[in-house]
Image (cartoon, rainbow, N blue to C red):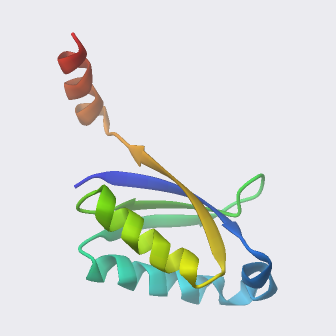
Amino acid sequence: MPTYVALVNWTDQGIAAFKDSPKRADAFAKLLQQAGGKLRDIYWTIGPHDMLVIADAPDDETMTATLLQLGALGNVRTTTLRAFSKREFSDITKRAG
């Protein structure tokens, strides 16, 4: 199953209710699970991003749809990256020649 890394930033609405962030993370995990994915981990961070999410989803469309649902709640904005494991990247490099 593909792995994704999402860089997450709070909106004004999200930061105003920062104490609810752990509960919102649990709700996101359930939403992703219902879509066939899995939240591997979430980290609250300092620096240019407020959180880092590592998750698996069956495909790009599923992850995108789930993150659109999350974003529509108004608490966060995301930048999402498709991540490749060492094995996956080794397969990619073999295809590249």
Quadrant in the rendering for residue 91? top left
- Vertical order, 78 against 48 (above or below): below
Q: What residue is at 46 percent from the left and 65 percent from the top?
A: 41
* Residue 92 pos. (x, y %): 24, 26
Q: What residue is at 71 percent from the left and 57 percent from the top?
A: 49
The number of discs equals 0
* Residue 58 pos. (x, y %): 23, 62
Quarter of the image for the N terminus: give it.
bottom left
Quadrant in the rendering for residue 78? bottom right
Q: What residue is at 46 percent from the left and 80 percent from the top?
A: 28
Quadrant in the rendering for residue 55? bottom left
- Vertical order, 94 against 57 (above or below): above
- Vertical order, 4 against 67 (above or below): above
- Vertical order, 30 against 3 (above or below): below
Q: Is residue 77 left or right of residue 86?
A: right
Who is closer to the viewer here, 69 or 83? Answer: 69
Q: What residue is at 23 percent from the left and 74 percent from the top?
A: 36
* Residue 94 pos. (x, y %): 19, 17
* Residue 32 pos. (x, y %): 35, 76
The residue most toward the top is 97
Quarter of the image for the C terminus: give it.
top left
Q: Is residue 38 left or right of residue 18?
A: left
